[in-house]
Image (cartoon, helix red, strand yellow):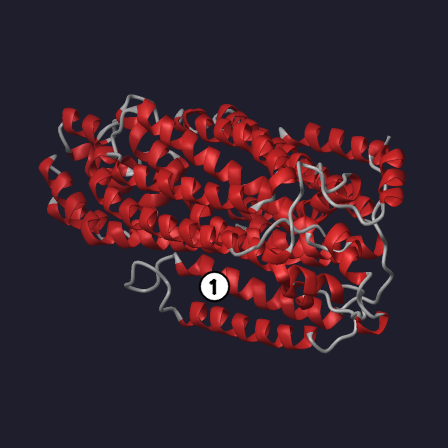
Amino acid sequence: MGYLVVTAVLVVSFGRLGDMFGRVRMFNLGFALFAAFSVMLSLTWMHGTAAAWWLILMRIMQGVGGAMLMANSSAILTDAFPSGERGLALGLNQVAGIAGSFIGLVLGGVLGPLSLRYVFLVSVPFGVIGTVWSYLKLQERGIRRPAKLDWWGNVTFAAGLIAVLVGITYGIQPYGGHTMGWTSPLVIILIAGGLAVLTVFCVIETRVAEPMFRLDLFKIRPFTAGNLASLLAGLGRGGMMFILIIWLQGIYLPIHGYSFERTPLWAGIAMLPLTVGFLIAGPMSGYLSDRFGARPFATGGMVVAAASFGLLEVLPVNFVYWQFAGILLLNGIGMGLFASPNRAGIMNSLPPERRGVGAGMSATFQNSAMVLSIGIFFTLIILGLASSLPATLSHGLIAQGVPSADAARLAALPPVSIMFAALLGYNPISTLLGPALSKLPASHAAYLTGHTFFPALISAPFQHGLDIAFDFAIVACLVAAVASLLRGRRYVHEEHGQAESGLAEPGRLGHDGTGSSVAAASAGDDLEGSQGGVSRVSDPAAVGGHLAQRR
């Protein structure tokens, strides 16, 4: 969670620094930092609480490097490719990221049982190779715009967003006699205070000469609609990935005979159809969006994703795997149809000198949506568990001969502890019962600590929570589809913005030169898309020179 919070907070600042000092420079530094702190994560010599704090701190510092990568990668690709190839380029980039995530998930499942150090060490060679490769091969082709740093904007944005995201993190943890912490004074102060500071941040950004967060970019309709759709899509799918892993590791795989130690690896393998769907749809939709615009593919992708969540809702907890795999494949296709065109639509709408900060703003929405989604989905699942889990757990334990007092003690545990037990892939019964377990008949003790008792016990309450979570995911995806539909037709700043600026009075342009593009983008539906797959170009000589430079 610390990694997500740090990347959500810093991507805008690093995107802004990329616009000022060079995007490739920031990208290279990010790769080096990511690799260095991957090494530090694997070298901890401490134990217990000290080791946990070390891992959290090193993971946060690794997130600084990750934020540099996220903030500048899309802008670098947008600089390097003409508008007719950006969708495919960004699609391939996202496919590479998804494939890397899956490989990391499987390798983590293989290496985790051997040593936790190996889980972190596995990213080191990739980080080192990526660092060397980027320094040797990447060239700076973006437009640098020297400017002063917006210190007050950076401080208030970081403070406000950190407070809100940390408040959400604590909100899903128990507080007093409550199953969750949303009524905790600390959580209320963090979230309310964070929102107040973010309000102050917005005021600051409207009054400084060189703001960090370019609020005027939201006047560009494709940029605003694309980011809103991205935020809603992130809310719909971010926490869902955790829920699916809990479903597999905590219930489905143990019921089917997999030991709890092996479930992390096989959960990653079981999720493979999701990755395959994205790999199929991502590059294809990106390629097609270069010719027909982002709107039909991004909108259709969200509708497909919503349908897949509806199918997951009617699937029983102990499902037939091929049905589950087919639905995951459909979900991956829907997300792949959405992601590449939506990202290309956002980046195409930005003026060249604002691509770094625009990409950072977009990444902030995505990463914040991930944290928000985790908080929302865990809250919905916990509400579902809390309504029926205590009685189910108590009756199940008593039926196996556990004394009523011990059964009541376990049933009173916060549902979030049950969820994290399932997420980590272990059976908590033996640990929680302690000495009481030795007083039971051997057959009963073996059944309680076996593969099936705990998963079968929580499956019905978990199903109730799943239904609520899937309903939310469906609504979020459908609203994202509406937001995507409102983006207008295909808009590329270099083409439509320059064409409009030729008709505008020079004195009417904004101080950043984006005034005419804002007017053009706001017209959305009045802009014609590409004709026959070839876009209208306002300066063929400039484009020809750019292509020659790329060759």
Which of these two is toward me, 446 or 419?
A: 419
Element on which disc 1 rests: helix
Question: Where's residue 419, x and y in %?
Answer: 34, 44
Residue 336 visible from this viewpoint = yes
Question: Where's residue 341, x and y in %?
Answer: 59, 42
Say what amino acid the circle numbered 1 marks. Answer: Gly
Q: Which residue is mark 1?
A: 167
Which of these two is toward me, 550 or 443?
A: 550
Which of these two is toward me, 199 or 341?
A: 341
Q: Relative to residue 253, is residue 369 depicted above or below? A: below
- Give the quadrant of residue 549: top right
- Give the quadrant of residue 540: top right
- Give the quadrant of residue 223: bottom right
Question: Where's residue 473, x and y in %?
Answer: 38, 48
Callout 1: 10 Å neighbours few (<14), some, many (20+)? Answer: many
Image position of 137 (left or right of 306)? right
Residue 268 visible from this viewpoint = no
* Quadrant placement of the C terminus: top right
Q: Relative to residue 212, is residue 448 depicted above or below? A: above
The residue positioned 37% from the left and 52% from the top of the image is 475
Question: Where's residue 477, x and y in %?
Answer: 42, 49
Image position of 420 (left or right of 505)? left
Which of these two is toward me, 535 or 550?
A: 535
How many circles with numbers are drawn on the protein?
1
Image position of 137 (left or right of 453)? right
The residue positioned 52% from the left and 38% from the top of the image is 337
The residue positioned 65% from the left and 57% from the top of the image is 361
